[in-house]
Image (tube, helix red, strand yellow):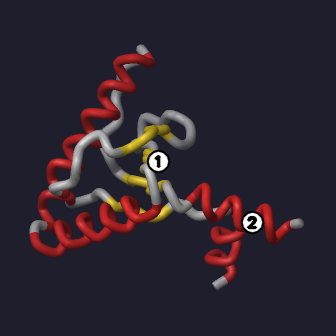
Amino acid sequence: MDIVNEVKEVQKHSHNIIIHSIEESLSKDMNECIIFDTEQVNKLYSLWSAKKDNFVNIILLGRSSTNKSRPIKLTLHNHCDVDQLISSFLKLKREFPSSVTNISIVKDRTLTDCRYIKKV
């Protein structure tokens, strides 16, 4: 039964990317934060030359902190969109590193994946 659950988790996470070091809204108003986050992601999409609004959901991860911005979990329509976006980002980072200086993106991982990576 654990294998079935793990497969489901892998499929669920395969549609997500995590974006680190993207600017976060300082507003306390939830609607303003949502608009700001969407604008930030759309700016990245324009840098990546990707189709805007091809994401399903945006979620800020973790607790708010004055020291650093929280990562954003971006849910896309399918895993192919994830691969294409990561590929575009890496190409942009190679060709124009100053445009995405501190930003990094990674595929979302399951808890099992994270534990394995920590061991290695």
Label 1 vs 2, first from the N-terminus? 2
65 or 17, nearer to the observer: 17
Residue 6 marker: 2
110 vs 72: above or below: below
Q: Residue 111: tell me if it is visible.
A: yes
Give the residue at x 24% y 41%. Answer: 42
Residue 44 coordinates in the image, percent (x, y): 23, 49
Alpha carbons under labels 1 and 2: distance apart: 19 Å
Crowding at dot 2, Cα within 10 Å, few <14 / some 14-19 / many 20+, comes out as some
**Figure check: 58 above or below 20:** above
**Residue on which the image places disc 1:** 75
Q: Secondary structure at mark 1?
A: strand
110 relative to 66, above or below:
below
Amino acid type of the residue that numbered disc 1 sits on in the rendered structure: Thr
Quarter of the image with the N terminus is bottom right
Residue type pointed to by label 2: Glu
The residue located at (13%, 57%) in the rendering is 99
Which residue occupies the foreground of this view, 52 or 59? 52
Quarter of the image where one finds residue 102? bottom left
Labelled pair 1, 2 in contact (Cβ < 8 Å): no
Residue 61 x/y as whole percent: 53, 43
